[in-house]
Amino acid sequence: DQQVKQNSPSLSVQEGRISILNCDYTNSMFDYFLWYKKYPAEGPTFLISISSIKDKNEDGRFTVFLNKSAKHLSLHIVPSQPGDSAVYFCAASAVCSGGSNYKLTFGKGTLLTVNP
Amino acid sequence: KAGVTQTPRYLIKTRGQQVTLSCSPISGHRSVSWYQQTPGQGLQFLFEYFSETQRNKGNFPGRFSGRQFSNSRSEMNVSTLELGDSALYLCASSLALGEGRYFGPGTRLTVT
């Protein structure tokens, strides 16, 4: 059962426009969400995170929105640049009562292509 | 500050052999976690270590094991390799459990 889903395998946008990457989750215990970017032959690079006590976190061109009732989060990149072309992974973790469970559960990724 | 380093970067093994992968975390980071990336399954959690103790474990068979040393460096071992173990193995470090993880470049393991 896939607990973190990225339903769009790929997304193509024009340089300068907004890129919106979506992620849905099913486990209501998840309380910490992260976005990673991955270039071929490199490990994932941490981009931005959000705790479940917030609904928005912004860092430069990157903004993550969290809608807990819908179990949905999105990553907005504005303006998009050709160098942003990469695979973007959404990840989530949970802290269970009585212990810790910080393992990250990843989505399968979305390939973003930003065209010049 | 140097990033997460993983050795070797590429490895070719045959079925039935065993393999050990190494990970050196960012200086000062005490948590190390391991992930397997395959085209069909994406990134899957293997296990996480903190202060030389395994804190979390994913749903992988017992052939996959790991350990962490007092200097926070970690090793992952896979015994009796199978063709399906061919994957990119990624190591990530963080200051503490639950923090944002910083990944290494990975070890590409090919089992023939």
Image (cartoon, coloured by chain):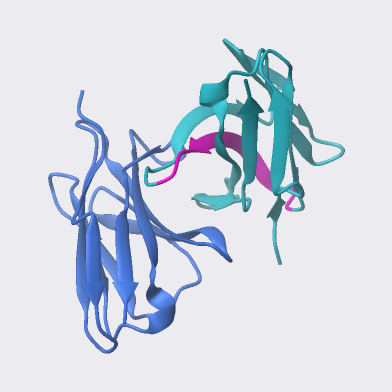
Chain colours: A cyan, B blue
Which residue in the rendered view is the most extreme toward the front?
A: A116
Tell me if B40 is positioned left or right of B51 in this view: right
The quarter of the rendered structure image containing the N terminus of chain A is bottom right
The residue at 73%/19% (across/down) is: A18
> With respect to residue B104, does A5 lie above or below?
below
x%, y% of residue A7?
Answer: 77, 50
Q: Quadrant of residue B55?
A: bottom left
Which residue in the rendered view is the most extreme toward the right?
A: A70
Q: Quadrant of residue A73?
A: top right
Taking depth in this image into account, of B70 and A42 the one nearest to the observer is A42
> With respect to residue B65, does A108 lie above or below?
above
Taking depth in this image into account, of A11 and B83 the one nearest to the observer is A11
x%, y% of residue A72?
Answer: 79, 38
Tell me how many marks there are.
0
The residue at 70%/61% (across/down) is: A2
- Magenta segment includes A49: no
Taking depth in this image into account, of A19 and A1 the one nearest to the observer is A19
Q: Quadrant of residue A23?
A: top right
Tell me if A48 is positioned left or right of B94 in this view: right
x%, y% of residue A77?
Answer: 66, 20
Tell me if B88 is positioned left or right of A9 in this view: left
- Any part of residue A75 in sight: no
Q: Kindly report the secondary structure that dominates the magenta region of the rendered protein.
A: strand
The residue at 18%/49% (across/down) is: B73
The quarter of the rendered structure image containing the C terminus of chain A is top right
> With respect to residue B82, does B24 lie above or below?
above
- Magenta segment includes A39: yes
Q: Which residues are magenta?
A: A27-40
The residue at 68%/12% (across/down) is: A16
- Any part of residue A107 in sight: yes
